[in-house]
Amino acid sequence: MRVRHHDGRQVHLSYCTNVHPAEDLPGIIGQFDTYAVAVRERLGVDVLGLGLWLAAPMAAELAGDGDARRRLRHELDVRGLEVVTLNGFPYEAFQAPVVKHAVYRPDWTTPERLDYTLNLARILVDLLPDDAERGSVSTLPLAWREPWPPARRDAARQMLDRLAHGLTEIAWETGRLVRVAFEPEPGCVAENTTQAVDMLAGADTDRLGVCLDLAHLACAWEDPADAVKRLATAGIPVVKVQVSAALEVADPIGARPVLERYAEPRFLHQTRTAAGHSCDDLDIALAENPAGPWRVHFHVPVHAPPEPPLTATTGLLREALGVVSCDHFDVETYTWDVLPPGHRPTSPAELADGIAGELAWTRDVLTGRVNA
């Protein structure tokens, strides 16, 4: 949906559909009816923004079939839905029980990742509202950090050059601009904005930039104002913001009985301490037991606090929304179905309620209805 930022700019606000993924066109359209329309109605808005996630096989099919793209655009329009951004981080089977590191593969050393991302850009130009200035696709920050020898770094650099060239060709052919946003994440080649500046040094920043996931920013223990200034000084645009909050715990020992309920087998929950101790998953942190406070890469609902004594990085989230300059804001809480019992939605209606609550909270912060 469109909202008027408290500084006067119009921005796009959406929610990321990887919270209820589908991997074929009938499934995607079915999710619109099950969730998106219900969220729009709860918010009382005429048009709701979606940050679509499309699996790689579906993206390849749509990129090669103009009729299917037009059908998807029609199905969005008749339901009062619009798309200006796509989530191109998970390649395939995001919610399936797979090896946790699989979400980082294929990475940016491979042509498969390049092809997937350019397919998403080709699809997006046909989904963009006529009055949208530009589109965005978020993606992983090159790769998981290991292994990362010089040969892989060089291969990734070549892929970024090819990506920028491909985006330029799409712009010339269609007259629509799509930018790709690399999303720093704990454990990856670029975990923080300092590493993101290094990652994109010399890249075409008219086409390429950063996606700031605000839970990731929190887990890196970065100050939002410093991070935004660092990127601006380097000339790297913030193309997209993932609105998200991380789990925080001041006293891991005292909170252990509650914290253990967040260690689960589907997703990596990288854990970082204020002193710089790094664990690649929550169960590792629970075994090593470094001194707190901890921040855990577990996207918790932005509008509802977790079970005490745990907290969320909502304060940092508010602060970041007040200083970042961007026009695409996408709420991404994909972990609703792995929240501990009692906090986990048990029906589509409850999930729609939760998504609507997150969007309403974010809207109110962005517009200044509540203090940022």
Image (tube, helix red, strand yellow):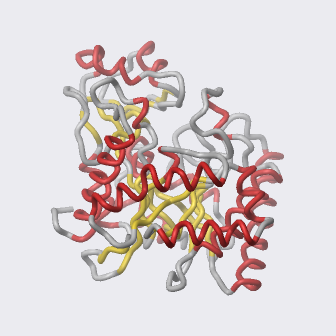
On screen, residue 58 versus residue 289, left or right, reads right
* Front residue of 223 and 40: 40
Q: Quadrant of residue 285?
A: top left
On screen, residue 368 versus residue 25, left or right, reads left
Question: Residue 135: in sight, yes or no?
Answer: yes
Q: Quadrant of residue 48?
A: bottom left
Looking at the rendered structure, the number of numbered marks drawn on it comes to 0
What residue sits 58% from the left and 72% below the top? 74
Q: Quadrant of the C terminus?
A: bottom left
What residue sits 52% from the left and 83% below the top? 133
* Front residue of 359 and 115: 359
- Image coordinates of residue 231 in percent, x first then y, are 49, 65
- Image coordinates of residue 141 in percent, x first then y, are 62, 51
What residue sits 49% from the left and 71% below the top? 78
On screen, residue 285 versus residue 53, left or right, reads left
- Image coordinates of residue 96 in percent, x first then y, are 61, 32
What residue sits 29% from the left and 43% below the top? 313
